[in-house]
Amino acid sequence: MADRADIANELIDERMAQALAARQGPRRHTLPVSDECADCGETIPAARRERMPYATRCVACQTRREGRR
């Protein structure tokens, strides 16, 4: 099981990748190929995909990963 530092580092890496991808602009295709959650395998809802196109997890899994309730 990952500790808080591991979870924080993963979150930082994910947010950094999102920021860099957003900065690259629309010319570079960096969206995930899959619309399935990386943790549970369920489909990431369309509303979340629109709001956060680089999301790799559903809201529930991302919330758990960030340690929120």
Image: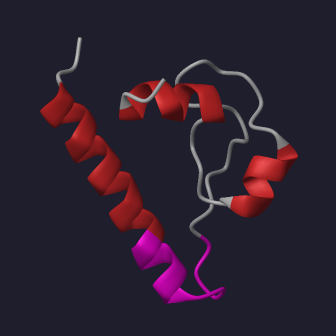
Which residue is located at x 46 percent, y 24 percent? 64
Which residue is located at x 48 percent, y 86 percent? 23
Q: Position of residue 53 (x, y in %)?
A: 68, 60
Q: Position of residue 10 (x, y in %)?
A: 29, 43
Tell whether position 23 is magenta: yes
Tell whether position 26 is magenta: yes
Q: Position of residue 26 (x, y in %)?
A: 66, 86
Q: How many numbered circles are shown?
A: 0
Q: Which residues are magenta?
A: 19-29
In the picture, which quadrant includes the N terminus? top left
Which residue is located at x 73 percent, y 41 percent? 35
Which residue is located at x 43 percent, y 30 percent? 68
Q: Is residue 49 visible?
A: yes
Residue extending farthest to the right is 46
Taking depth in this image into account, of 20 and 3 the one nearest to the observer is 3
Q: Is residue 58 visible?
A: no
Looking at the rendering, which quadrant does residue 6 occupy?
top left
Tell me if residue 42 comes above or below residue 20 in the rendering: above
Looking at the rendering, which quadrant does residue 7 occupy?
top left
How was the colour assigned to the protein in this rendering? Answer: secondary structure
User: In the picture provided, is 44 more to the left or to the right than 61?
Assistant: right
Residue extending farthest to the front is 69
User: In the picture provided, is 49 more to the left or to the right than 16?
Assistant: right
Taking depth in this image into account, of 60 and 19 the one nearest to the observer is 60
Q: Position of residue 33 (x, y in %)?
A: 67, 50
Tell me if residue 22 comes above or below residue 58 in the rendering: below
User: In the picture provided, is 35 more to the left or to the right than 22?
Assistant: right
